[in-house]
Structure formats: structure tokens, C-alpha cells
């Protein structure tokens, strides 16, 4: 069966602050071309003389870019700081373990003092 355009909906998403258009969407509605006769009820040779075009304007909510950047900066700062602290504590504790093992006579078959 043939289908003809009945309705076209165009949705335009724009910014309220500067009026720039961010997105354009379309939605079409078709109906069956069951009227194949001549010029009857607004139809001409099986095709409608007109169809509806509907425009929908959607105001997009403004985004606080500075607030988002501040949150991202703080998150990166906290992760970097915790990584540095973790690396420092791991490094100093392994050095202490190494020194203690030398003093106790362990490691490498060296001669160490025996304590009673």
C-alpha cells in the first residue's frame, strides 16, 4: 500500500541564554493512501493537497559550566593527593622493613648478630 505524509513535527532545542540552536529533531506521521480517486475531499490524484507542519520550540536548561569545572578539579585534586600520599606511605614503610630485616640478620645470607 502507498502511504502519504499526514503530519510533520519539527522539534527545535535552543539555549535560553544566547538563543543558539542545539538540536533539531523531526517526527513524521503517515497514513494509508486509500483514496485513489480523483479530486475528492482535498485529494488530487491520490495525493493530499496539504499536510500539517508543527514546530515545537524547547528551551534547554542552562548549564553551570564553572560549577562543573570546579567539581571536576576538586575530584582530580583529591585523587592525585591520595595517590601521592599512598605512594609516600608505601615507600617509607618498605624502606623500614628493609632496614629491620638487615638488623635481624635476615636477607642475603649475611652475618648478623644473634640476640638473646
Image (spheres, rainbow, N blue to C red):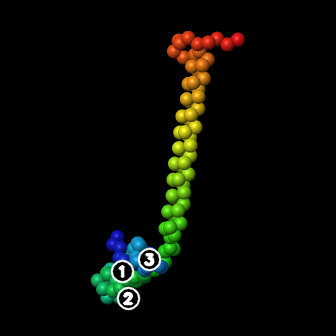
Sequence order check, earlier mark of 1 and 2: 1
Tell me whether circle 2 and circle 3 mark residues in contact (CB < 8 Å): no
Q: Quick one: quadrant of the N terminus? A: bottom left
Mark 2 or 3, closer to the camera: 3
Confirm whether residue 64 shows in the render: yes
Q: Who is closer to the viewer here, 83 or 102?
A: 102
Residue under the image location 32 percent in, 88 percent down:
39
Q: How far is mark 1 from mark 3, CA to CA?
A: 40 Å
Regarding mark 3 in the picture, which secondary structure is present there?
Answer: strand
The residue that disc 3 covers is: 14
Q: How far is mark 2 from mark 3, CA to CA?
A: 38 Å
Q: How far is mark 1 from mark 2, CA to CA?
A: 9 Å
Regarding mark 1 in the picture, which secondary structure is present there?
Answer: loop
The picture quadrant where one finds residue 91 is: top right
Sequence order check, earlier mark of 2 and 3: 3
The residue that disc 1 covers is: 35
Spot occupied by residue 53 in the image (x, y as percentages of width and height): 40, 82
Q: Residue furthest front?
A: 113
Residue under the image location 35 percent in, 85 percent down:
50
Q: Quick one: quadrant of the C terminus? A: top right
The residue that disc 2 covers is: 41
Q: Who is closer to the viewer here, 32 or 62?
A: 62
Residue under the image location 56 percent in, 11 percent down:
111
Spot occupied by residue 20 in the image (x, y as percentages of width and height): 40, 77
Regarding mark 2 in the picture, which secondary structure is present there?
Answer: loop
Q: Label 1: how many residues lie within 10 Å, few (<14), some (14-19) or many (20+)?
A: some
Mark 1 or 3, closer to the camera: 3
Tell me whether circle 1 and circle 2 mark residues in contact (CB < 8 Å): yes
Spot occupied by residue 89 in the image (x, y as percentages of width and height): 58, 37
Amino acid at each position: 500500500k502507498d502511504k502519504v505524509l499526514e503530519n510533520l513535527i519539527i522539534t527545535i532545542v535552543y539555549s535560553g541564554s544566547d538563543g543558539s540552536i542545539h538540536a533539531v529533531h523531526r517526527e513524521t506521521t503517515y497514513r494509508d493512501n486509500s483514496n485513489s480517486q480523483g479530486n475528492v475531499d482535498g485529494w488530487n490524484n491520490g495525493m493530499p493537497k496539504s499536510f500539517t507542519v508543527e514546530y515545537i520550540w524547547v528551551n534547554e536548561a542552562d548549564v553551570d559550566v564553572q560549577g562543573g569545572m570546579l567539581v571536576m578539579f576538586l575530584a582530580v585534586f583529591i585523587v592525585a593527593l591520595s595517590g601521592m600520599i599512598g605512594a609516600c606511605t608505601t615507600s617509607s614503610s618498605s624502606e623500614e622493613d628493609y632496614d629491620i630485616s638487615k638488623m635481624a640478620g635476615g636477607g642475603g645470607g649475611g652475618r648478623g648478630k644473634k640476640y638473646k
